[in-house]
Amino acid sequence: MNYDLVIKNGTIVTATSTYSADIGLKGERIAAIGQQLTGHRLLDATGKMVTPGAVDIHVHMQMPIGNFTSADDFYSGTVAAAFGGTTSIIDFVERERPLTFLEAIAARRAQADPRVVIDYGLHMTLGPHEMDLLDQLPDAFAAGCISFKLYMAYDFCLSDSQMLRALQAVAAVDGLPVVHAENWDVICDLVAQNLAQSHTSPHWHPRSRPAIMEGEATGRVIDIANLAGTRIHIFHVSSPYAVLRISQAREAGQPVTGETCPQYLLLGQELFDRPGVEGALPVCSPPIRDKAAQDVLWSALGTGELQLVTTDHCPFTRAEKASGLDDYSRIPGGVPSVEMRFPALYTYGVFAGRITLNQWIDSCCTTPARLAGLTGKGDIQVGYDADLVIFDPQRTMRLSTETLHEQVDWTPYEGLTLRGWPAVTISRGEVIVEDDTFLGQPGRGRYAPRSFG
């Protein structure tokens, strides 16, 4: 058979195996994996790895926070993702009153559909104002919104009783609850204490959100989920105490998963001590912690105590970050990572000997796709979507605002040099990045069907 596109001479790397073979694509799908395949177009992957397209199930494109909106919209953010080898993302729906859940999903899709260049899905946020609308969860689930974001912080913060009700409702539709776990009462009191003592600089940000209280909140919501009879996924783990709570629950047989992010693996809390806006730039929540915490997170990835790496991509400009210099609690939180995540995990994970090649693919591609219900993605199998990356392990990339494509005027990874970078990114059979050139079009991405079948 003559295929539309054949990737030849590459080393295929999946979550479970590493081997040499050609891949034949027909339309949007992987049609064959074998030897000596022929096609209308050939891509030579000699000396390179062929991986599934990476999957990032935690991003915030054009997300409003107070008076600001995150700097990457659905076009710029998904272009940056594609350059970094990510071919699917999951973003969020935050319902505006008086919309129904279905109306809120439609409104968010109206923002995304004309702009995305890769496939995407949506988590539905359930805050205090959604407690009287939980009977609408089956409608949201049927519309493809099969995971639900629950906060233990900010204006979205749920009380323990509300958390129980929300988890019970999500369990009733067999959805996946995904949780921001921090102790908001303690945070608010520590912030108030610091400001009363004129402790206003970003130095106090991590000291207002203690690692031990992230662990407390993680354990508490895991216990509530156990009571509600539901699985649960913990977002953006930064604390060794949270790792311990997740590990203990899994050892007890509870269906709990956890993720961490590049900022927690690669950056240290000394960044908050830099003068002026430089100290404000890395503000995110939970906060970046110390080197000892980094070591625990890397170890947890290697042992499987944490199962995946996402980004929580939510960048703001330098000027927006500077707006909170007289009160660190008003600095808009979030950092840009959507482009560098996949290659950074190769450099600092695989190349550094912390995780294996197959664990790299599992944590960045296969487990995220499975966990989020992105059927036909995250693996290299016949019949799967042809979301693929030709990855050059020899190419070096120095990270800066000049080399990255995120729509923001800084990066927390300025000056880091990665060994290994995508040479080609393919989304549903279409080459969308090649030779450092974006070849796709806005709107070519799709709202992805999701299922926990």
Image (spheres, rainbow, N blue to C red):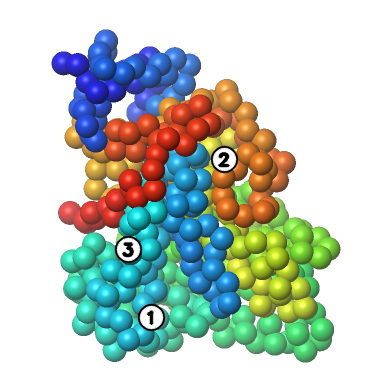
* Crowdedness near tag 2: few (<14), some (14–19) or many (≥20) residues, C-alpha within 10 Å: many
In this picture, residue 290 sits left or right of residue 227: right
Residue at horizontal 26 percent and vertical 17 percent from the top: 40
445 to 90, vertically: above or below: above
Looking at the image, which is closer to me, 49 or 75?
Answer: 75
Which label sits in the foreground, 1 or 2? 1
50 to 304, vertically: above or below: above
The disc label shown at residue 109, or none: 3
Task: Please tell me which of labels 2 and 3 falls first in the chain.
Answer: 3
Residue at horizontal 46 percent and vertical 21 percent from the top: 48
Disc 1 residue type?
Glu
Residue at horizontal 58 percent and vertical 53 percent from the top: 407
| Spot occupied by residue 346 in the image (x, y as percentages of width and height) | 53, 35
Q: Alpha-carbon distance for marks 2 and 3?
A: 30 Å
Q: Alpha-carbon distance for marks 3 and 1?
A: 14 Å
User: Image quarter for residue 53?
Assistant: top left
User: Image quarter for residue 416?
Assistant: top right
- Look at the numbered discs 1 and 2 and tell me whether their residues touch, using CB distance below 8 Å: no
Q: Quadrant of the C terminus?
A: bottom left
Q: Quadrant of the N terminus?
A: top left
Look at the numbered disc 3 and give the secondary structure of its residue. helix
The disc label shown at residue 96, or none: 1
Q: Is residue 206 visible?
A: no
In this picture, residue 275 sits left or right of residue 389: right
Disc 3 residue type?
Arg
Q: Which residue is mark 2?
A: 344
Looking at the image, which is closer to me, 335 or 176?
Answer: 335
Look at the numbered disc 2 and give the secondary structure of its residue. helix
Disc 2 residue type?
Ala
Looking at the image, which is closer to me, 387 or 418?
Answer: 387
| Spot occupied by residue 272 in the image (x, y as percentages of width and height) | 75, 63
| Spot occupied by residue 85 in the image (x, y as percentages of width and height) | 45, 38
